[in-house]
């Protein structure tokens, strides 16, 4: 289950990179006394950009979990949005050194 959730999360990050400020964090699974397993995935997104998580990501997770257990229901996956103070908001950016290396590769490849 965790491998599938991690793979779906990686695909979501690739598809919706523009809404993210940081890479998502996948917490350690927690087992409850009732036998349930809770997995928390923390997305750091720009304010007001939770639509793809609430719709696309959640539905893909629910469908994937239904393959493991057909009794799995939509209400079992919750999405909670917490806003951070503006001072805490820092953009998720590619380091300049990485951009320069990529530009250099592109220039080298285009000159051939």
Image (spheres, rainbow, N blue to C red):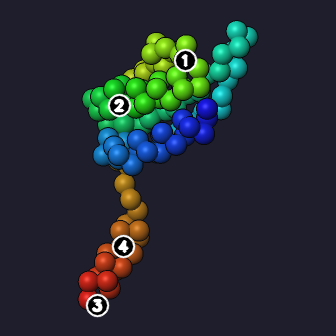
| Label 4 neighbour load within 10 Å: few <14, some 14-19, many 20+ | few
* Distance of label 2 from label 4 (alpha carbons): 31 Å
* Distance of label 1 from label 4 (alpha carbons): 46 Å
User: Which label sits on residue 102?
Assistant: 4
Q: Secondary structure at mark 2?
A: helix
Between discs 2 and 1, the one toward the N terminus = 2
Query: In this image, 7 relative to 100: left or right?
Result: right
Query: On screen, 13 above or below 112?
Result: above
Instruction: Look at mark 3 in the image and give the residue it sits on.
Output: 112
| Label 2 neighbour load within 10 Å: few <14, some 14-19, many 20+ | few
| Label 1 neighbour load within 10 Å: few <14, some 14-19, many 20+ | few
Instruction: Look at mark 1 in the image and give the residue it sits on.
Output: 70
Residue at 54% across / 35% down in the picture? 5
Tell me if I can see residue 86 in this picture: no
Q: Which-is-in-front pick, marks 2 and 1?
A: 1
Instruction: Look at mark 2 in the image and give the residue it sits on.
Output: 56
User: Which label sits on residue 48?
Assistant: none
């Amino acid at each position: 289950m965790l491998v599938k959730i991690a793979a779906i999360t990686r695909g979501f990050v690739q598809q919706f990179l523009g809404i993210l400020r940081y890479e998502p964090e996948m917490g350690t699974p927690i087992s409850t006394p009732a036998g349930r397993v809770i997995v928390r995935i923390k997305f750091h997104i720009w304010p007001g950009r939770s639509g793809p998580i609430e719709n696309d990501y959640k539905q893909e997770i629910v469908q994937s979990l239904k393959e493991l257990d057909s009794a799995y229901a939509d209400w079992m996956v919750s999405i909670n949005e917490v806003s951070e103070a503006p001072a805490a908001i820092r953009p998720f950016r590619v380091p300049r050194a990485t951009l320069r290396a990529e530009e250099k590769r592109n220039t080298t490849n285009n000159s051939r």
